[in-house]
Amino acid sequence: MARWRRITGAAGLAAGAAAAGAGAVLAAERATIGRMRVKPDPAAAEPFGQLRGRSVTVLADDGVGLHTEINGPDDSPVTIVFCHGYTLNQDTWHYQRKYLAAVSRLVFWDQRGHGRSGSSSPEHVTIDQLGADLYAVLMATVPGDSPVVLVGHSMGGMTIMALADQHPELFGTKVIGAALISTAVSEIDPTVWLPGPLRSVARYAAPTVLRGAASGRGAPLIERSRHAASQIAFLSTRLIAFGDPAISPTVVDFLERIIRMTPIEVVTDFFHALLKHDKLTALRVLGQVPVVVVTGEKDRVVPLRQSEILAAEIPDAELLTVPGAGHVIILECPDLINEVIIDLVTRATEGRTRRDQSA
């Protein structure tokens, strides 16, 4: 009991210090936000969240409905399947849906509890379950032996690793390539972006605080506060998600809105799932197909070192480090990401053709 009081006391002091610091930062940054919003914004006219595909509901093995959408020509020789990250949804692939549907068939899906997909009981909120969900999506949307390239961002990359662990027979046959963006092979520390003195406190306190917030009468209050704290949310989203401080405020607002719409219980349960993630044994399976690992140099969620470890453990994987970019590089550097995906699809298709000819 004494130790718990010491921890919570430290957490209270840290929270007070953080609140005071946040207030000072907020006051200093208000003028900066104002200046950002009056500057010309090339993304201001983007129809974020409005692009849609042909809707399909895929049932997971535990009965959860997974909202899935398909874009592009059905007669495309390759289907690209996109897996989004923690607290996000398929709309974060806005620029990929917008520009790649002209060249390939695309499948987007919302992870359980996220976006338009159904909610899940806590015991089914694991990275392994996400791998099983991805398998269900593949079987429902890309039947038979039609080839697939998988693209995963953050937790979506972990989902691909879980699939490789559960269904190694798919890699080199049905799955012909994979892009792993801003992700890691083992335990992600969601507190990594915090200043050093607050990090250890947050590691102790965050799971308990989140679990308490998501249960009972506290949840509605937490949700209301999340929706009210717009300026703080804008600043924290810009800091954590992006490397470029001049990132479009429209893009920041769009991402912050997606995160805010993710229920607090989903944030809580997947927080624990991320802490337990470890798929090192699956990486040799991924090495059976062309793999590109993409990371932002200024990623505050998945440090560069973790991406280097991931790429090193996958046989023949390519590592692409993008100078100045942050964690949500798919929105920060969309043209580059699209080029990476197109190049991967080309290499994967050529490799499959050579294997078929030599068989």
Image (tube, grey):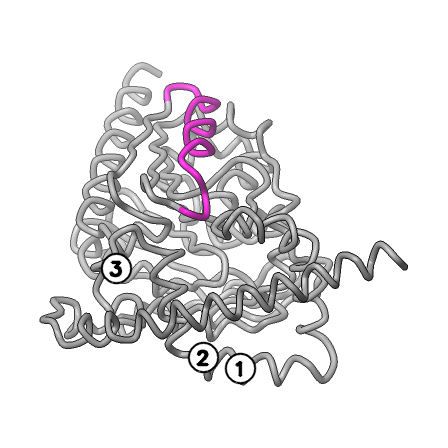
Q: Left or right: where does residue 289 sit relative to residue 189?
A: left
Q: Which amino acid lies under the numbered mark 2 shown in the image of this protein?
A: Ala
Residue 132, percent across and down? 59, 49
Q: Which image quarter holds the N terminus? A: bottom right
Query: Residue 44 falls in which quadrant of the image?
Result: bottom left
Closer to the observer: label 3 or label 1? 1
Residue 225: give its label.
1
The range drawn in magenta is 300-316
Q: Does the magenta stretch include residue 315?
A: yes
Q: Which amino acid lies under the numbered mark 1 shown in the image of this protein?
A: Ser
Disc 1 vs disc 2: Cβ atoms closer than 8 Å?
yes
> At x 43% / y 67%, what residue is drawn?
56
Closer to the observer: label 3 or label 2? 2
Residue 128 versus residue 333: which sits nearer the camera? 333
Q: Which image quarter holds the C terminus? A: top left
Tell me which label, 3 or 1, sits earlier in the chain: 3
The image shows residue 289, relative to residue 44, as above or below, that is above
Mark 3 and mark 2: Cα distance apart in space: 30 Å
Q: Left or right: where does residue 166 sit relative to residue 46?
A: right
> At x 26% / y 38%, what residue is drawn?
322
Q: Is residue 244 magenta?
A: no
Q: How crowded is mark 2: few (under 14 residues within 10 Å), some or many (20 or more)?
A: few
Q: Residue furthest left?
A: 40
Q: Where is mark 3, residue-wise?
A: 97
Residue 234, percent across and down? 36, 70
Q: Which amino acid lies under the numbered mark 3 shown in the image of this protein?
A: Arg
Q: Where is mark 2, residue-wise?
A: 229
Looking at the rendered structure, the secondary structure element under dot 1 is helix
